Image (cartoon, rainbow, N blue to C red):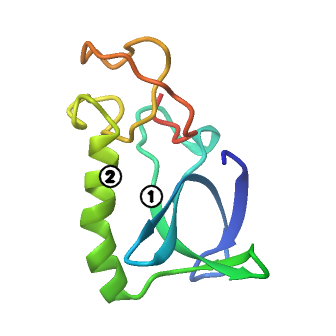
C-alpha cells in the first residue's frame, strides 16, 4: 500500500501521494493518501487527502474527490478510525494519531507502535 501515485492538482501540477489506508463507509470505498515521507521537510506534517476509487472490472482505474456532503460525513468517521488505531489517541507530538508505528516507542507516549503506513510522521 506504500506505493507513490501521482495526481494533478487544480493548477495541473504533479502531486505525489502515498495511499496509507483504505476503508468502507456507508457502502462506499475510500482511500486515504498522504504526502510521501521523502517529500516532507523536517518537522513538516504530511498533507492528507480522502479519495474515492473508481472501480471497473474489480480493479481500481482512477480516484476522484468525494463531494462536500461525502466529506462532511466521512471525515469524523476517519478521524475516529485513526484515533482508535493509535493507542495514545493522537496526543503524541511526533505522530498525530495516524496509527502507524515501529517496534519501539519513539514518540514518548509509553506505548509500542507498528510503523508500516508510510505516512512520513516518523
2 and 1 marks in contact (CB < 8 Å): no
Q: Quadrant of residue 2?
A: top right
Q: Residue 50 appears at what percent x and percent y?
A: 46, 68
Seen at 45% across and 82% down, the residue is 66
Spatial CA span between label 2 and label 1: 14 Å
Is residue 4 depicted above or below 110 in this figure?
below
Q: Position of residue 20 (x, y in %)?
A: 55, 49
Q: Which mark is residue 75?
A: none
Front-most of residues 34 and 27: 27
The residue where tag 2 is placed is 81
Question: Which mark's residue is nearer the viewer, 2 or 1?
Answer: 2
Which residue is depicted at the point 45% across and 26% down?
Answer: 101
What kind of element bears circle 1?
strand
Q: Which residue is mark 1?
A: 48
Q: How would you rate the neighbour count of disc 1 (Cα within 10 Å): few for under 14, some for 14-19, many for 20 or more?
A: some
Residue that appears at 47% across and 32% down = 42
Q: Is residue 64 left or right of residue 67?
A: right
- Mark 2 burial class by Cα count in 10 Å: few <14, some 14-19, many 20+: some
Assign a secondary structure to mark 2.
Answer: helix
- Depth check: give the residue in front, 48 or 31: 31
Eyeballing the image, is 110 above or below 4? above
**In the image, what residue occupies the spot 37% across and 77% down?**
26
To which quarter of the image does residue 33 belong? bottom right
- Horizontal and vertical percent for residue 119? 51, 42
Residue 14 image offset from top left, x and y in percent: 70, 68
Which circle's residue, 2 or 1, is located before the other in the chain?
1
Amino acid at each position: 500500500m506504500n506505493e507513490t501515485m501521482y495526481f494533478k492538482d487544480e493548477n495541473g501540477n504533479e502531486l505525489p501521494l502515498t495511499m496509507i489506508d483504505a476503508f468502507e463507509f456507508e457502502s462506499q470505498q475510500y482511500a486515504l493518501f498522504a504526502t510521501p515521507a521523502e517529500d516532507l521537510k523536517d518537522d513538516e506534517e504530511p498533507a492528507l487527502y480522502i479519495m474515492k476509487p473508481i472501480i471497473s472490472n474489480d480493479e481500481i482505474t482512477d480516484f476522484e474527490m468525494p463531494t462536500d456532503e461525502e466529506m462532511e460525513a466521512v471525515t469524523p468517521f476517519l478521524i475516529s478510525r485513526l484515533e482508535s488505531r493509535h493507542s495514545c489517541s493522537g496526543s503524541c507530538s511526533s505522530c498525530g494519531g495516524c496509527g502507524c508505528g515501529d517496534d519501539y516507542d519513539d514518540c514518548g507516549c509509553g506505548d509500542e507502535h507498528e510503523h508500516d503506513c508510510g505516512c512520513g510522521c516518523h
